[in-house]
Image (spheres, rainbow, N blue to C red):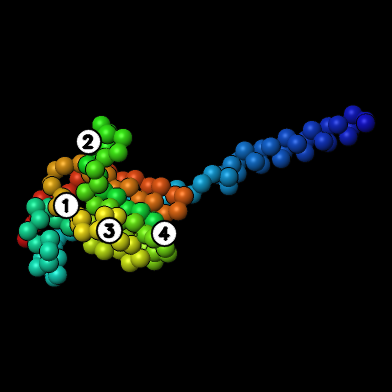
Amino acid sequence: MTTKNILIIALVLFLGGLSLYFNRDWFSSEVIQVSHRSISPRGWMARGPGAKAPANPVVFLIDKELKLTSVKVVVVSDAETNKYPHAIWNLVSDSNSIPTKEFIYGTPIHGMRLAVKGVGPDPLEPGLNYRVLIEAGSTKLGHDFVPVPRTQ
């Protein structure tokens, strides 16, 4: 091989490596964001089963539609001290759940059921740190939130 061929091969390898370096996000997994919002109880929420709850209803928002396989809410202090924290709300999907971008704490999600039959959601306590753990296939998400006191 001549020196010219070696230099051309080295230049092509350098440019290819430089291109991979600048476009490395092609190989990373997509970041999915979870957020929450406390809402004032209106309509059926003000009269429904959670009407006497001490905290406002919490809506969870996901920036991409996902087929959820598991939704679990735990107390953060419990999750930090126990390997298997007690879930205050736990839903699972046996088959295909409907893709969703949002859901309200304690309300049914289409295609999902309670993990333990007959054990519904515990009321949220204002000012206490909670963590929602969401699974959609191999994707696992978590988000911490603090409910606000009930407003009328």
Sequence-wise, the earlier of marks 4 and 1 is 4
Q: For mark 4, what is the residue?
A: 66
Residue 122 image label: 1
3D distance between C-alphas at marks 4 and 3: 18 Å
- Image position, residue 143 (x, y; %): 31, 46
From this viewpoint, is residue 66 visible? yes
Image quadrant in which you'd find residue 85: top left
- Image position, residue 17 (x, y; %): 69, 37
Nearer the camera: disc 4 or disc 3: 3
Sequence-wise, the earlier of marks 4 and 2 is 4
- Image position, residue 75 (x, y; %): 22, 42
Residue 77 image label: 2
Q: Nearer the viewer, residue 61 or 135?
A: 135
Tell me which amino acid carries mark 2: Ser
Q: Secondary structure at mark 1?
A: loop
Nearer the camera: disc 1 or disc 3: 3
Tell me which amino acid carries mark 3: Leu
From this viewpoint, is residue 62 visible? no
Judge left or right: residue 122 versus residue 5.
left
Tell me which amino acid carries mark 4: Leu
* Label pair 2/3, CB-CB below 8 angstroms: no
* Residue occupying the point 23% across, 62% down: 107
* Residue occupying the point 7% across, 58% down: 52
Q: For mark 3, what is the residue?
A: 114
Q: Secondary structure at mark 2?
A: helix
Sequence-wise, the earlier of marks 1 and 2 is 2
Instruction: Name above or below for residue 143 compared with residue 44.
Output: above
Nearer the camera: disc 4 or disc 1: 1
